[in-house]
Image (cartoon, rainbow, N blue to C red):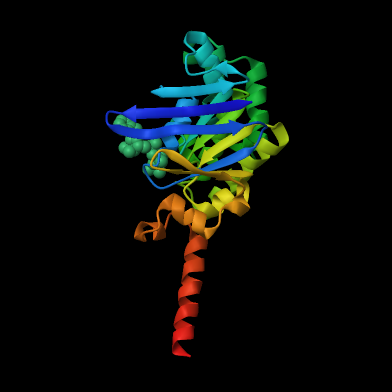
């Protein structure tokens, strides 16, 4: 379905993504993990064509994506909707209009400027908001909603495009644990019920393990792990994040820190015997 082959992005001397190869042969939910600067965002941005690749290929059903231009490129971008950490909503605009902006590709600029959307689209936007449990907020300004609700509005806007892929760049990094859970569950449901592929950059291992069918680990621009969540052992995680002190960064994984703490406690207990 989607094949990424030796995809590379260089910024001057810095290789942000280095010959990344990834095959997605059926709809799934993929979590991409790796420390800051590993190339996770750059990889997603290349898939969506927000950033042009320096080398390599992206093939969707055998069709080259990296060279698409004009309307074909826009159609591809509609097929792989992006969601960002900071939601990227228009704060002062009402929720339903924000969602309707997901149809931007299909309407004239003038119609969009004056918020002239077909009734059919308005109904669909409300249905999507309802599905995400936030229809009652439709008339409110986006800025009046909580972070978790705003991210669900961003997901609704993405769904208006009827995308094949949802590319989520740290979708829960700005949310508290409760809201993070609601947003991850929403993404999971969209994958399971609609058969859309979700690729999400995640900054905690726990989240990747809990919600994803497959985990991809990046380090220094390279894909160094690609497997099932259960194959993501502590040892593998150490390799992805680097085995040094930076591995214990709070953001990396609470679970592994707990493991480490338990091990330390055990060693201390043994030492006292
Ligand atoms: N527009 C740019 N110009 C120059 N260098 C860039 C640009 N975007 C990213 N980089 C560099 O590319 C590398 C990968 O960055 P990227 O943002 O993809 O990492 P990341 O894994 O998403 O990190 P984080 O977890 O902090 O979001 C970094 O070294 C970064 O400094
Ligand atoms: Mg990033």
Decide if residue 85 is on the left or right side of residue 191: left
> Who's the residue at 49% across and 22% down the image?
57
Q: What residue occupies the far left of the structure in this picture?
A: 13
Residue 227: quarter of image: top right
Spot occupied by residue 175 in the image (x, y as percentages of width and height):
48, 48
| Nearer to me, 93 or 50 | 50
Query: How many circles with numbers are drawn on the protein?
Result: 0
Q: Quadrant of the N terminus?
A: top right
Decide if residue 87 is on the left or right side of residue 136: left
Q: Is residue 269 above or below residue 34?
A: below
> Who's the residue at 44% across and 32% down the image?
19
Spot occupied by residue 100 in the image (x, y as percentages of width and height):
56, 23
Q: Is residue 141 visible?
A: no
> Who's the residue at 65% across and 37% down the image?
28
Q: Is residue 270 visible?
A: yes
Q: What residue occupies the far right of the structure in this picture?
A: 193
| Nearer to me, 26 or 254 | 26
| Nearer to me, 104 or 60 | 60
Spot occupied by residue 37 in the image (x, y as percentages of width and height):
36, 42
Spot occupied by residue 89 in the image (x, y as percentages of width and height):
46, 31
């Amino acid at each position: 379905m989607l094949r990424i082959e030796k995809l590379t992005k260089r910024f001057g001397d810095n290789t942000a993504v280095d010959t990344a190869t990834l095959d997605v042969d059926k709809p799934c939910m993929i979590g991409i993990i790796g420390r800051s600067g590993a190339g996770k965002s750059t990889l997603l941005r290349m898939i969506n064509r927000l950033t042009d690749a320096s080398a390599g290929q992206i093939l969707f059903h055998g069709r080259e994506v990296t060279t698409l231009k004009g309307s074909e490129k826009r159609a591809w971008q509609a097929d792989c909707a992006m969601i960002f950490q900071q939601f990227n909503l228009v704060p002062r605009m009402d929720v339903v209009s924000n969602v309707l902006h997901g149809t931007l590709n299909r309407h004239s600029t003038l119609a969009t400027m004056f918020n002239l959307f077909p009734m059919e689209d308005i109904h669909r936007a409300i249905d999507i908001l309802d599905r995400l449990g936030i229809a009652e907020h439709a008339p409110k300004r986006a800025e009046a909603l909580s972070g978790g609700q705003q991210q669900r509005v961003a997901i609704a806007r993405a769904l208006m495009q009827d995308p094949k892929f949802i590319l989520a760049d740290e979708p829960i990094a700005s949310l508290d644990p409760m809201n993070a859970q609601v947003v991850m569950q929403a993404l999971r449901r969209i994958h399971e019920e609609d058969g859309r592929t979700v690729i999400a950059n995640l900054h905690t291992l726990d989240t990747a393990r809990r919600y994803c069918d497959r985990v991809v680990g990046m380090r220094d621009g390279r894909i160094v792990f690609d497997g099932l969540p259960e194959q993501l052992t502590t040892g593998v995680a150490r390799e992805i994040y680097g085995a040094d002190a930076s591995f214990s960064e709070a953001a990396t994984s609470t679970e592994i820190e707990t493991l480490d703490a338990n091990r330390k406690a055990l060693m201390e207990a043994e030492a006292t015997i």
